[in-house]
Amino acid sequence: MPNPPDQLLWIDNTAVDSHRQQRFETRNPATGALLARVAEADAGDVDAAVRSARAAQVDWAARSGVERGRILAAAAAAVRAHRDELARLECLDGGKPIAETPEADVDSAADCLEYFAGQAASLQGEYQTVDGGFFYTRPEPLGVCGGIGAWNYPLQIAAWKTAPALAAGNAMVFKPAELTPLSALRFAEILAEAGLPPGLFNVVQGAAETGQALTRHADIDKISLTGEVGTGKAVMRDAADTLKAVTMELGGKSPLIVFDDASLDDAVSGALLGNFYTQGEICTNGTRVYVHEAVIDDFIERVVARTRQLRIGDPADPDTDIGALISPAHRDHVLDFIHRGEAQGARRLIGGEAVTVEGCPDGAFVSPAVFRVDDDDCVIAREEIFGPVMTILPFRDETEVIRRANDTPYGLAGGVFTTDLQRAHRVAAAVKAGVIWINHYNLTPIEMPFGGMRQSGIGRENSRHALEHYSQLKSVFVATTGVDAPY
Ligand code: NDP
């Protein structure tokens, strides 16, 4: 088989090699096949990207919101026009089922561009008369923003950071995860085709050091990271030296609470969606499923029966429900959690084994696992695994389950299944998390703010609130009287 072409960096709407011409490989996690050798950016390349972004941002910010929005709308249409191609790329590079990627990845990115295309012209200030005159405020862009992405939703993450940044008049330098570098480059080409001027979306590839070069760069005004809590802390420390603004979209161990009056079929569907979609590699997953003791046996029976029906397979097969984990190392990490959990008393009800898939002998597959856990301190009930591992824990009453749900340093998301209207809203208010779903799980419409509380994050993505994290207010005081100086 011929070698695939090398993938380069993207600076000034041009594919450029890195100064040192170093390469890293990206492979299909389902087959181990080499997908590309990718140019690795060092601090010098990051600097070139930042200089290009800085130069482009001035003119971009001077354009009207309507004009910026028009280009974002064209970009949304262009992403939709490339739906199949982008969906295939996310499937190949990330091991995600092709049954998911057109909607969950590509449509999500296009929706985001479309939404912020509309919002770009909505940025407005305020006006108030005060003693001696009046003032008005001007929402102004931050300048050059750095985006650092995780590997689970590469295109979506790139869009969720870039669309609001551009709408507000900023430029973006984006570093995708080293494991999934491909879609950001294609996204960059598509944005350029749609008319985005050079320099406004630059892509620097590489691992943590490249991310660090972004975070430490003195001429970057803001960093938006999607990644683990530990990475968030390291990035905040690095950002502190230049007092950069930060948005942090970090990990979680979210509770999903099922009361005894819930529609069990819906609750089971929610738990399956909230644990096994994208092989469980989703930050908001409801991996601690608290089920009322009156219905736990019934719930378990239904969850296990429906988990048994899930098809593990080649992600490129449209019938596949569970694709490959991102890498063999991550598979081993997930299996290690499972073994440690069992050693601490977790009862395995189904799954949790390395699986070999026909045609994908080197793939990192793990069968979806369901555990019953009676001790909240069990490692698989406390720590983020980021794989297809559901823990089911019994509870007796509302006060107790809320206390247990909140007994975690995380606060990303949560869910409650109940038909009691008052209880649903009481629980939604009491669970400390940035997003709560009542009688559903993991829906993230672009119109709804998204982000975590506590150690799960800082700031919000999506919705018009995202614009607040990509702009800053300037107050302008205007005197309507003379200056009455006391000296
Ligand atoms: P990591 O934290 O390992 O990496 C995230 C990104 O940060 C990668 O691009 C990584 O580079 C980069 N990076 C790592 N160290 C540094 C550093 N010191 N300075 C700057 N950049 C750095 O996360 P994963 O990619 O493994 O993604 C999984 C995690 O992401 C989970 O915890 C998950 O919950 C979280 N996540 C959160 C979401 C949210 O919206 N709240 C959504 C999706 C995922 P590289 O990997 O190339 O080395």
Image (tube, grey):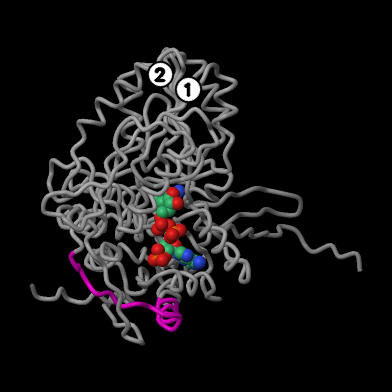
Task: Report how far apart the C-alphas of labels 1 and 2 lie in the structure.
Answer: 7 Å
Some atom of ligand 1 lies within 8 Å of the CB belonging to the residue at label 1: no
- Above or below residue 286? Residue 244 is below
**Rendered residue at 35%/54% (across/down):** 332
251 sits to left or right of 444: right
485 sits to left or right of 233: right
Range covered by the magenta-colored residues: 33-52
Mark number, residue 296: 2
Q: Amino acid at mark 1?
A: Pro
- Marks 1 & 2, CB-CB < 8 Å contact: yes
Q: Amino acid at mark 2?
A: Ile
Check the picture and name the quadrant holding the C terminus.
bottom right
- Above or below residue 37? Residue 295 is above
- SS assignment at label 1: strand
**Magenta-span inclusion, residue 37:** yes
Give the quadrant of residue 185: bottom left
Where is residue 370? Give x, y as percent: 35, 33
Dot 2 crowding, Cα within 10 Å, few <14, some 14–19, many 20+: many
Give the quadrant of residue 298: top left
Mark number, residue 154: none
Pick the front one: 138 or 236: 236
376 sits to left or right of 151: right
Mark with earlier residue (1, 2): 2
Q: Which residue is mark 1?
A: 394
Check the picture and name the quadrant holding the N terminus.
bottom left
188 sits to left or right of 135: left
- SS assignment at label 2: helix
